[in-house]
Amino acid sequence: MTRISFSFPLANGLHARPASQLREACQRVAARVRFRNQRNRTCADADSVLELVASGTLKDDPCFLEVSGPQEHEAARALRIFLNRELPHADDDAPPLAAPSSGSAWLPPLFQDGAARIWPGLTIAPGLGRARAVHWQKSAPLPQRFAAGKNDAKKELRLFRNACREVESDLKKKAAAGQERNAVAIIKAHLAILADPGFRERISGLIAKRKKSAGQAIGETTAHYARILKKSPSVYLRERVGDLEDLAYQLGEKLYGPSQAKARRPLSAPCIVVAESLTPSELLGLERRYLRGLVLGAVGLTSHTAILARSLGIPAVSLPHAGLVRIDEGSEILVDGRRALAILSPGAALKRYYRMEKTTAGKRRQQLALLNRRPAETRDKVRIEIAANIAGPAELGLAWRSGAEGIGLFRSEFLFLEREAPPSEEEQYDSYQQAARSAGKRPIIFRTLDIGGDKPLPYLALPLEANPFLGYRAVRFYNEHADLVCCQLRALLRATAGSGRLKVMVPMVTTVDEVRRVRRLLSEAMAGLRERKVAIARHIELGIMVETPAAALSIDSLAREADFFSVGSNDLLQYTMAVDRGNTALAGLYDPLHPAFLRLLLQVARQARKAKRWLGICGEMAGKIETLPLLASIGFAELSMTPQRIPEAKERLAQLDSGECRDLLRRALRCAEAAEVSALLAEFNGRGASGEVISADLVRLDSSCRTPAEAIKELCDRLELNRRLSDSLALEEAVWKREQTFATDLGFGFALPHAKSAAVRTASIAFLRPARPMRWSGSSRSVVRGILLIAVPENGGDEHLRLIARLSRQLMHEDFRLALLSAPNAGTVLAALRARLAGG
């Protein structure tokens, strides 16, 4: 027996996703594998996902695998590679696990008298929803009677197996048809539990040997695993109980019929669903067109129901039982996921307040939608394309909806993995053609097969290696498997015939000869297709990924063979810093802000520009919003990232000035450590989009707001829409706390609310002129006709005091007051404020 010791690397412990990957890794080897956790002395068969999850394994637990069998040494070698290379990244593409925190206990004054009752809770999913309440009844317990109608173990067992097949078929259909990534991931987790031999065998044993009914057997098995999971110190693992119970009820539906498993009427009008608990399958089964929000009880923040609500954009809050039982069927309820509130019977003032919030949210979406349609560029019109990294055609829709201007990395290996034989040319052609048609005139860079070492294929029989990232992978095995590569190239050439353009990118290049070899294979593929009179792309470019220091330092030579370059920052960084990026003990060294790495990127960009070659970057660094000021000045023509990050990247890029970014890069290159660069970036990113304290977007004339609460909210929202704030609610709270200490009605028809807040990015002044004058406080005799809001960062020193003093002095002058109150447009207000602020 061979023992492999390791420390468990994942923050959320050994849950279903890494457990299923470990199981798959063990199934690929010809050996028996047992998993042991030394901390809690648990043991699990590595073939059982549920046993692995039930082991209660947490981050940093000391663990080992016991490998035995005729090929244990080869198996142990492969499993060491899995543990070192794949397991640490099992959660890299996981859906979000943490919801926003509970809302602030503070609420604007108008909330005090604005509703029959306000229930504070915990945010499950942000957003606003208002409709009538519909109570969703808790799932009935599984029937204990025999599904066969009599105590017939053989027939009961047959019915249970049929139910498993039906549920499996349903889940596979839902996964195949699923458009939402997180929903598909959750469905696959349920499939993994259903396929677990321990789960099925335990139920089958209770039916066959103990003569239990199917309902009893499913219930007892679910309870057995639930008891184990509930003992885990990890909240995340405890909340996997909901997935077990969900699957149990799905089996119950097949065995006993839906009228027995759950008796509920379908949604038929807009509503807020109120429920003690809701399973993922129940949520996915609700009529989305009528669902405006959720008020739930026993739903954890890391449960799959919570993850789904966030992914699907359904506002949701969790309330204590006392709150849930006070919500009457049919009563009007407003769900505020941002503040973690359920508001019963909101009054007219609260409805107006929330209409303002909804309007602001709509404008924010419009801002992002407008950015999605526009080319990405800096504030001073320097063009940098923002593209998407995808792993197949299924992700194209999300990429285009997110505003991708092209696909900077199409990972073709998705077609080659998890199968016993390579995909045919026709299968590849269909997939690539689907992508090409979807893209239209937008560019797609297809990366050729990046397999080997840490990503083995059973049909290639690649050697097991102790150091696979430096081994026989990617372009390095193309010569020995030329037929496989030519097949892919033919499919690509044919698939892009309609668009007329093909961009092929080769991974893991270190030498010029490797590029020449691929070009020869490409020429052979083209010649063969032309001989058969098959249409192919007319304009063909062959590029390489810059992933090795050798490639980075040979751009001038490689440019003689390569038409374009794209930096793969993940691999290039780990090879430059001599750090295994999967080794958590060395995480501090794996930092793209290290000055040495920045210098290398700048050298690559300069050499590519000198060679007149296009250069992009498609690693993780490209999608980090905080590093955009550096990347915008290095010289990349394209930044390619996961689709979800594109809207924020476009928005941030539009705020940057290329000259300021170049100055930042010069200072960063003079630093000695990554920490120094990080501090420079933090200071630069904290400046906001503009150095000016006032802009036309911060001026609102003839506002319809009626009260100080509405006026302050409108001004804070304007600052957030202008990207001067990270959170308008935080500033609103700070303003009101100041206001309640000392009313800021100056007299002369003006109010001057002000506050410091960590949410403020840059010192700002916003002006609002209501259509109708308002009283600012109960004690005030005068009415307010103009409101100037001053907001400064928490670390803004005494800047707010200087601004207040300056504006207060100017407001003593009648001509200035009249200029603001009679201004015909925002430009006139802006000119008056600028002149007075400049003059002191």
Image (tube, rainbow, N blue to C red):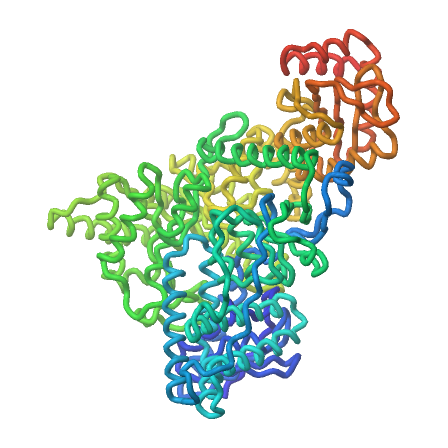
370 relative to 592, above or below: above
Quadrant of the image containing the C terminus: top right
Name the residue furthest left. Answer: 532
- Residue furthest top in the image: 815
Residue shown at 65%/74% (left/top)?
Answer: 232
Task: Name the residue: 62% across, 62% down.
Answer: 276
Q: 599 and 176: which one is in front?
A: 176
Q: Nearer the viewer, residue 27 or 483?
A: 27
User: Residue 589 at what x, y percent from top left?
Assistant: 61, 56
Q: Is residue 227 above or below residue 281?
A: below
User: Residue 493: horizontal and vertical position, in percent?
Assistant: 23, 48
166 in relation to 153, above or below: above
Judge from the rendering whether residue 533 lies leftward or rightward of residue 154; answer left or right: left
818 is higher (above) or lower (below) than 168: above
| Residue 182 seen from this side | yes
Q: Is residue 794 visible?
A: no
* Residue at horizontal 38 percent and vertical 47 percent from the top: 396
